[in-house]
Image (cartoon, grey):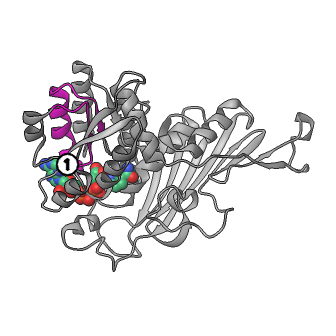
Amino acid sequence: MTSKARIAVAGAGLIGKRHIEMAAKSELAQLSAIVDPSPAAQMIAQQYGVPLYASLEALFRHDRPDGVVLSTPNQMHLAHALECIAAGLPTLVEKPLAHSLEAGIRLCEAAEAARVPILVGHHRRHSAVMAKAVEVIQSGVLGKLVAVVGTVLFYKAENEGYFEGAFSWRREPGGGPILLNMIHEIGNLRTLCGEIVAVQAFTSNATRGFPVEDTASISLRFASGALGTFMLSDTAASDHSWEQTSGEDPRYARAHTDDDDCYHVAGTFGSLSIPTMRLSRYASAADQSWHKPLQKTTIALEAADPLARQIDHFADVIQGRAQPFVSARDGLQNLRVVEAIVEAARSGRVVELAP
Ligand SMILES: NC(=O)c1ccc[n+]([C@@H]2O[C@H](COP(=O)([O-])OP(=O)(O)OC[C@H]3O[C@@H](n4cnc5c(N)ncnc54)[C@H](O)[C@@H]3O)[C@@H](O)[C@H]2O)c1
């Protein structure tokens, strides 16, 4: 039997705690250490019975894990990833790959030169819903893809400290829902519909009045010629978001009914609503008309926690059984699309993207 991959988690904050939990209970991985200079991390290290180090450098002086999860703040991703790459260690870098495109490119180039595998933490790519949706779309049952309509509409409370004190950067440009939340949607949309080659966008801060946007409407053109439209708001009393409709992350309130979706992907022969996985199709080519009813079915799914699947996949990457499902180049392209949306909204122009 192969031994478990020994994984150190750097950054034991909001998402780092979930990686710690996943590594500790994985059948393929084992939590070897925590790296975090914050005093709050001591209790977590004690709880899991693993050593705590204040820096990656201190960790590497004492031990050599098989891989590292970097769930440190965005601005630190590049420097921390370069340390892991120099040590030759496969690394799971939380999304976004880096705080800027330039930093992301440096990270990719360093990893490629050293041949160190990087997995980017776009964890929804490990979702059972996404895997099934991709399978359905790629099977061709929808026909040629025509359009995708998506929503990420939810409410970030102003009385839960989200925008206050150390987190007041979330009121400023760069701290809003386009960079923090839309990047997940871009990862999903590229996976479902292929490369995005052009974007247009409007943004508004009319509701909260912060310098950063609270709402955006986004138009997308895919390389296939399909078009997409996406509504994003973090100040909308709605649960039409991935987390609330999929129920994959217990931290978010689940949408009330099982018929709420956040994406609708339409082809020439059928359409798929996600995450309910309701499929509408014409019975035959002869029935392909708006005068004829579409046949409705719901595709069965087995629920799975994408973060648990991600850590198991990371163990496979570390032990050479798999290539990263979300590579550094893939994470970089998500960042590029998000930056194009920001630029499109700022300039009022169409921004074209090279795949
Ligand atoms: N995949 C997701 O759904 C998801 C969700 C939330 C956050 N994230 C990403 O994860 C990263 C962390 O976000 P967060 O919300 O958990 O932030 P956080 O502020 O809650 O946690 C960051 C942690 O890093 C620690 N830290 C700071 N400097 C460090 C250093 N030099 N070495 C080691 N640890 C250090 C901090 O003490 C803190 O515990 C960000 O890149 C964010 O975009 C991803």
* Total tally of numbered discs in the picture: 1
The vertical placement of 265 against 285, above or below, is below
Q: Nearer the viewer, residue 170 or 14?
A: 14
Q: Residue 48: horizontal and vertical position, in percent?
A: 26, 52
Quadrant housing the N terminus = top left
Q: Residue at x 38, y 46 (%)?
A: 25
**Magenta stretch in the rendered image:** 64-92
Q: Residue furthest bottom?
A: 159
Q: Which amino acid does the dot numbered 1 rest on? A: Gln
Q: Residue at x 20, y 56 (%)?
A: 46
Graded by Cα atoms within 10 Å as few (under 14), some (14 to 19) or many (20 or more), the crowding at tag 1 reads: some
The quadrant holding residue 328 is: top left
Q: Which residue is mark 1?
A: 75
Res 281 seen here: yes
The vertical placement of 285 against 275, above or below, is above
Q: Residue at x 47, y 62 (%)?
A: 250
Q: Is residue 22 left or right of residue 221?
A: left
Q: Is residue 81 magenta?
A: yes
